[in-house]
Image: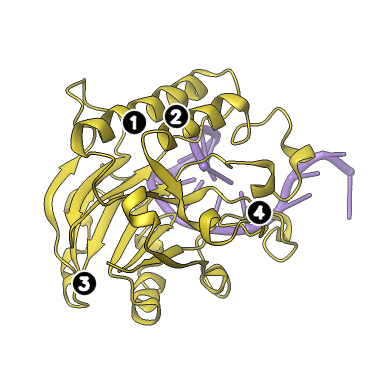
Amino acid sequence: MRIATWNVNSLKARMERVPEWLGYAQPDVLCLQETKLADAAFPHLAFQALGYESVHHGSGQWNGVAILSRVGLESPVCGFADGGEPDQDTRLVTARCGGVSVLSVYVPNGRAVGSGHFAYKLAWLARLRRHLEAVASPADAVAVCGDFNVAPADQDVWDPKVFEGSTHVTPEEREGLSELLSWGLVDAFRGVWPDEKLYSYWDYRAGDFHEHRGMRIDLVLVSRSLAGKLQWALVDRNARKGKFPSDHAPVLVDVEL
DNA sequence: ATGGTCGAGTATCGA
């Protein structure tokens, strides 16, 4: 099974590139973030014509997440299922695809260290773990896919010095991610490529992509049962090139089921 | 030279 995740930075703006990418990358499951669409505007039919069922959780303008699957899509859940108050944002959708519990997540950016948005980001990460506890067991086949807005290690940013004091690299954010991993998840890309410095996001400005000034913040986290069956992982940098790209590249992982 | 670019929507804000 090929599982992929892609922050598309507006699905409306990416409706040429996403179907094109499905055609050549052939994922079985694709998690999308930042669709920036209301549910009524999500192009279910266009994806159905390509063989994908889909579930979307969005409110328009900001955020918005989806799961596309050509191996079945059952028991969709929008937002947190931990019994708490509904999230103010549309950042999480969960579904069962081909025997795997799949989560598409868009962790808040945090904006500035110490801000209210930063506190919301940390709380959101902690709540994601509680959601996971509510919907799955670590012994299950689980894939938590998305834009985490956290670079797990200094290896995952082009120049750690530039990011000192900034979001995405603080000990608090990395601790939040570690707490999530400690539920029973493995960073699939890093498992396949322990030493590579490869990124999944590059700012549009200043030619950052061509200068290799990026961060690896888009992750596929798999439970141990899937981690043992990892075949391959890839950041598709080609999808960041050319006309009208997202500022993120898709990350894909192959597991033998 | 201290910006640079996108996408939302149509003045700025968010990333």
Circle 4: residue type = Gly
Q: Chain of mark 1?
A: A
Q: Chain of mark 3?
A: A
The answer to whether dots 4 and 3 both sit on one chain is yes
A221 up-or-down from A28: above or below: above
Figure quadrant of residue A153: top right
Circle 1: residue type = Arg
Mark yes or no: residue A154 visible. Answer: yes
Q: Is residue A240 left or right of residue A224?
A: right
Q: Residue drawn at (20%, 31%), measured in percent from left and top?
A: A134
Circle 3: residue type = Ala
Q: In the image shown, does A242 or A250 lie closer to the viewer? A: A250
Q: Gap in Å between the C-alphas at discs 1 and 4?
A: 27 Å
- Which is more foreground, mark 2 or mark 4? 2
The percent position of residue B12, horizontal first and vertical second, equals 55, 34
The percent position of residue A55, horizontal first and vertical second, equals 19, 54
Look at the numbered disc 2 and give the secondary structure of its residue. helix
Return the residue at label 2: A179
Q: Chain of mark 2?
A: A
Q: In the image shown, does A257 or A144 lie closer to the viewer? A: A257
- Which is more foreground, mark 2 or mark 3? 2
Neighbourhood count class around disc 2 (C-alpha, 10 Å): few under 14, some 14–19, many 20 upward: some
Which circle's residue, 4 or 3, is located before the other in the chain? 3
Asked whether the beta carbons under mark 2 and mark 1 sit within 8 Å of each other, the answer is yes
Q: Residue drawn at (58%, 51%), measured in percent from left and top?
A: A216
Q: Residue drawn at (58%, 72%), measured in percent from left and top?
A: A241
Return the residue at label 1: A129
Which circle's residue, 2 or 3, is located before the other in the chain? 3
Asked whether the beta carbons under mark 1 and mark 3 sit within 8 Å of each other, the answer is no
